[in-house]
Image (cartoon, rainbow, N blue to C red):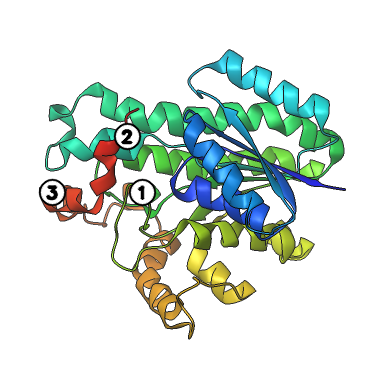
Amino acid sequence: MTKIAIVTGASRGFGRGVAHVLGAESDYRVYATARTKVALDELREDVANSGGAGEIVPIVLDQNDDDAVINFVNRVTSSEQKIDLLVNSAYAGLIAMTPHFGKPFWERPISVYDGSMNVGVRSSYVMSKLVAPSMVNNRSGLIVQISSWGGFTYVFDVGYGVAHAAMDRLSFDMATELQEHNVQAVTIHPSGGQTEVTEFPDGETPTYVGRSILALVEKADSDFLAKANGKTLFTAELAAQFGFSEDHDTDGALNRARLEGLQPFKAISANRLAQYNLDAPLPRAADTNNSDFANLFPGAKKFHI
């Protein structure tokens, strides 16, 4: 039976990589959603020409439009016997915040906050809420939020941190309610990326992030998924455990470096978050909220919310 996935934000970035890997490196029928038809059509052609066993079904969808999202999910559930995987990757916060690096929250437009919360937290909740009944009825399925280490310490912007903390908690709380139905919800934390929008040095490619999710659905056993349910998983650790890599990381050195670079953030996440620890110092906003960091998001100006 063909496996079915829904991937949001699939026209670019990590969402595109996830959709491409599921179609080109496995046999998923991927309902790939975004607002840009041209980019989705290009994704469909790329997967069709890859020689993979999967396929892309491009869906032009504005996730601010609840009625359109409801109609889309109804279409999928009426034509497919089940939905195996939902990946919530749509996120407008990066594009919204990039022009305002170096400013505190009170000098940024309210729209910057809305960019993270609306197509980000809210859209992930709505899509998950609509897809969950199918998974519950079939007693199988995996819901994935793509988040960031900004969820447990200050990075870039107030809205960015609040949104990613919320997405991490979204998986935890959904998993709490889904666990008795044999459905899992997890969060994936990539490090900085190399995408159409971002250019972090040695950043993770969309393909690498896609392989992290493919590993969860094809290599992880039921014991691992039960343990991981509701939790935040780091792509570099998944790569080490399940044996995938970047195409250009032929000797594994890049992933070893990523694992080493992950350790300070693991230490933060393993302890009480600063807001619950009276003795913890506050981060310095200027360390990541400065005009130099805007250079890591050169592609943001090409897109709009």
**Residue position marked by numbered label 3 in the rendering:** 290
Could you say where residue 103 lies in the image, as x and y percent from the top left? 12, 37
Q: CA distance from mark 3 to mark 1?
A: 21 Å
Q: CA distance from mark 2 to mark 3?
A: 21 Å
Nearer the observer: mark 3 or 1; the answer is 1
Asked whether residue 3 is in view, the answer is yes
Name the residue furthest top.
Answer: 67
Q: Tell me which amino acid carries mark 2.
A: Phe
The local secondary structure at tag 2 comes to: loop
Which of these two is toward me, 246 or 159? 246
Circle 3 crowding by C-alpha within 10 Å: few under 14, some 14–19, many from 20: some
Q: Is residue 125 left or right of residue 113?
A: right
**Residue position marked by numbered label 2 in the rendering:** 303
> Which image quarter is the C terminus in?
top left
Residue contact at pointers 3 and 1, CB within 8 angstroms: no
Residue contact at pointers 1 and 2, CB within 8 angstroms: yes
Q: Tell me which amino acid carries mark 3.
A: Asn
Q: Tell me which amino acid carries mark 1.
A: Glu
Residue contact at pointers 2 and 3, CB within 8 angstroms: no
Q: Residue at x 37, y 33 (%)?
A: 116
